[in-house]
Image (cartoon, rainbow, N blue to C red):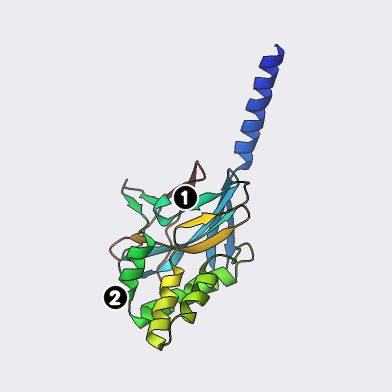
Amino acid sequence: MGLRGRRAALVLTLLTAFEFQAQVIDFESGGLHYRTLTRNGLTIMFASLPSRIRAYAVMQVAVSNGSEISWNVKPEDFTFHAADGVAIQAAPAAEVVNSLMVKASRKDVIHLVTQYEAGIYGNTRMKLANGYESRRQNALAEVASAKLKAAAAASAIALVSTRLLPGDSTDGALFFPSNGKPLGAGKLVIHAAAETFEFDVDTIPAK
């Protein structure tokens, strides 16, 4: 084998080793089952939330950019593929916020906020510098009435389109239109950082 052949074999070996290492990691935190995967320097972590709000099934997601370049992340990058072949794309943040403001009851909002916060604040692997907590504080600082504060807190949960600089992170909730039904088992597919991330999604009991 010549020098060029040995180099090609070495590159193939390194790429194979990298792909082998880039495996989905499972762990439990705060009563939620998380899965995380790193590709091209971008790490995505998610967990399905047992509660649903109005017409949406909800997932909690965190994204951290460990690469040397910037990447854009938005809800529409995430698609759930059900076992029966139906594909459901996460709703844009503006659509979710408008729906929560108009249709969600106070009980819905409190339940979702409580569950979401229990997940992120109990998860030591999740960075909170540029995500929900920052959006919540900014939203609450701009409103006065208790009713508007509740709505602002709810809207701060939704993952928004974000440009992540090297070292940046963000988190938020993904809202999948499901007519109020659980998503069930399937696969979560994300197109981000010029890569395709794939996660198995389990069926979880509703609360």
* Helix, strand or loop for disc 2: helix
Quadrant position of residue 164 = bottom right
Q: Amino acid at mark 2?
A: Val
In this view, which residue lies farthest toward the right?
Answer: 3
In the image, taking residue 93 as reference, residue 20 lies left or right, namely right
Residue at x 38% of width, y 63% of height? 93
Split into 4 quadrants, where in the image is the N terminus?
top right
Mark 1 or mark 2, which has the lower sequence index? 2
Q: Residue at label 2?
A: 102
- The amino acid type, in three-letter code, at marker 1 is Asp
Q: Is residue 115 above or below residue 172?
A: below
Observer-side mark, 1 or 2, equals 2
In percent of width and height, residue 145 lies at 40, 88
Whole-Å distance between the Cαs marked 1 and 2? 33 Å
Q: Position of residue 116 (x, y in %)?
A: 49, 71
From the viewer's side, name the closer residue of 117 and 33.
117
Relative to 66, does residue 108 appear above or below in the rendering?
A: below
| Mark 1 Cα shell of 10 Å, populated few (<14), some (14-19), many (≥20) | few
Which residue, as the protein is rendered here, is positioned at the far front?
A: 142
Instruction: Say whether residue 136 is visible.
Output: yes
Residue 24 is at least partly visible in this image: no
| Residue 36 spot, x, y in % from top left | 56, 53
Label at residue 200: 1
Image coordinates of residue 161 in percent, x first then y, are 44, 58
Give me the residue at 63% from left, 50% from top: 66
The residue sitting at the top extreme is 2
Name the image quarter holding the C terminus: bottom left
Residue 50's place in the image compared with 87, above or below, is: below
Nearer to me, 195 or 149: 149
Residue drawn where x is 31% and y is 47% of the image:
84
The secondary element bearing badge 1 is classed as strand
